[in-house]
Image (cartoon, helix red, strand yellow):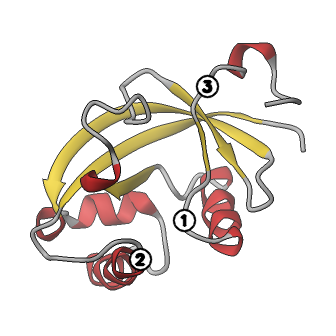
Amino acid sequence: MSGLPEQYRDAVTFAFGDSPTLADELLALVLAGKKTATCAALRDYAGDSADKPVVGRRDVVLDGAGKPAAVIETVEVTYRRFDEVDSAFARDEGEGAATLEQWRHDHESYFRRNGGFSPDMDLLCERFRLVEILKR
């Protein structure tokens, strides 16, 4: 990807959410220090996919226009069922009211839009830290 600093040229790139608007909203939370965690349906990763987060790896976060905006470093990866996510993780995701109830509501809607939802679905849960804000 052009415009990236050399050390990030081979990094995994991704945008949060499932729309340009949501990508920008979630990126803003990361940049503000409010969002330090994220999760995905485990089914979205094929086997031992190279896209799975790994502790210590640095990834490039894209904005809603697909432009590199920030670099994050994974600090924790856990696997749990949707119905096992706790209030601490919901708070660290930093979205909405940051309550567990709001997290469940919003994420159930998200997963229903993106392949289906079940309370016992497996999630890959990641905590990260903001390393660098990239010039756009």
Which residue is rendered at x = 36% and y = 25% of the image? 55
The label number, if any, that marks residue 110 in the structure image: 2
**Residue at the outermost front position:** 46
**Which residue is denoted by mark 3 in the rendering?**
11
Residue 39, position as x, y percentages in the image? 36, 55
Whether pointer 2 and pointer 1 mark residues with C-beta atoms closer than 8 Å, the reply is yes
Where in the figure is residue 122, as x and y percent of width and height?
A: 17, 57
Q: Quadrant of the C terminus?
A: top right
Inspect the image, locate mark 3, and give the three-letter code of the amino acid beneath it: Ala
Q: Are marks 2 and 3 in contact (CB under 8 Å)?
A: no
Position of residue 57 relative to residue 24, above or below, is above
Task: Measure how far apart labels 2 and 1 are at the Cα level.
Answer: 8 Å
Q: Residues within 10 Å of mark 3 (few under 14, many from 20)?
A: some
Helix, strand or loop under label 2: helix
From the top left corner, tell me how far across and down residue 31 is, in percent. Answer: 68, 51
Q: Which mark is residue 17?
A: 1
Q: Which of disc 1 and disc 2 is earlier in sequence?
A: 1
